[in-house]
Structure formats: C-alpha cells, structure tokens
Image (cartoon, rainbow, N blue to C red):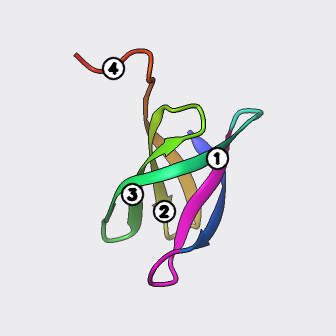
Amino acid sequence: MLLAVETTPGLHGDPEPSAFRLGERPLAVLQIVDRWMGQNEHYFKLQASDHALYILRHNLIPDTWELTLFQSPLHPPR
C-alpha cells in the first residue's frame, strides 16, 4: 500500500518518517523502534499515535513509501 509520508532529516541527513496518512487518517510517529537498509530501500519499524506497530519501506528509486506490516495493539501476534 503506497503512503503519503512526512519526513524529517535523520542522524545522517537521510529522510525519516515523522507522520503518515493511512487512508484519510493522519498518524504521528511516536517512536522509531528499529531501522535497516537494503540496497535500494530503507525500512523503519515504528510505533504510531494509534499505538500500533508499522513497518514502512522507503523505496529510494522511485522515491515512494509503502506499508509492509501493520500490527494492532489490540491483537498481538501469537
């Protein structure tokens, strides 16, 4: 699912998510829990203002963001 993501410069100047829209619902990033880099993408595991966990992928070429995981705080994994 493609997303509209607001970013701020991270530690090394690379964009990091600070907020995003899931449909019409705006969500703020409360915490970046983890991050890792692939060859042409960066991944961010984060907790959003709805207290759910998300993994967002930033595709460097083209410059797009995608939702790759959603974990509801109401339904933790078994």
Give the Cα distance between marks 4 and 1. Answer: 21 Å
Residue appearing at x 57%, y 49% in the figure: 29
Distance from the alpha carbon under mark 1 to that under mark 2:
20 Å
Decide whether residue 61 is among the magenta residues. Answer: no
Does residue 17 show up magenta in the picture?
yes
The circle drawn on residue 7 is none
Residue furthest right in the image: 24
Give coordinates of residue 32: x percent, y percent: 44, 55
Residue carrying label 3: 43
Q: CA distance from mark 1 to mark 3?
A: 17 Å
Provide the secondary structure element on which disc 4 rests: loop
Asked if 69 appears above or below 44 in the picture, the reply is above
Residue type beneath disc 1: Ala
Q: Earlier in the sequence, mark 1 or mark 2?
A: 1
Of the two numbered discs 1 and 3 in the rendering, the one whose residue sits closer to the viewer: 1
Kindly report the distance in space between the C-alpha atoms of the residues bearing marks 2 and 3: 9 Å
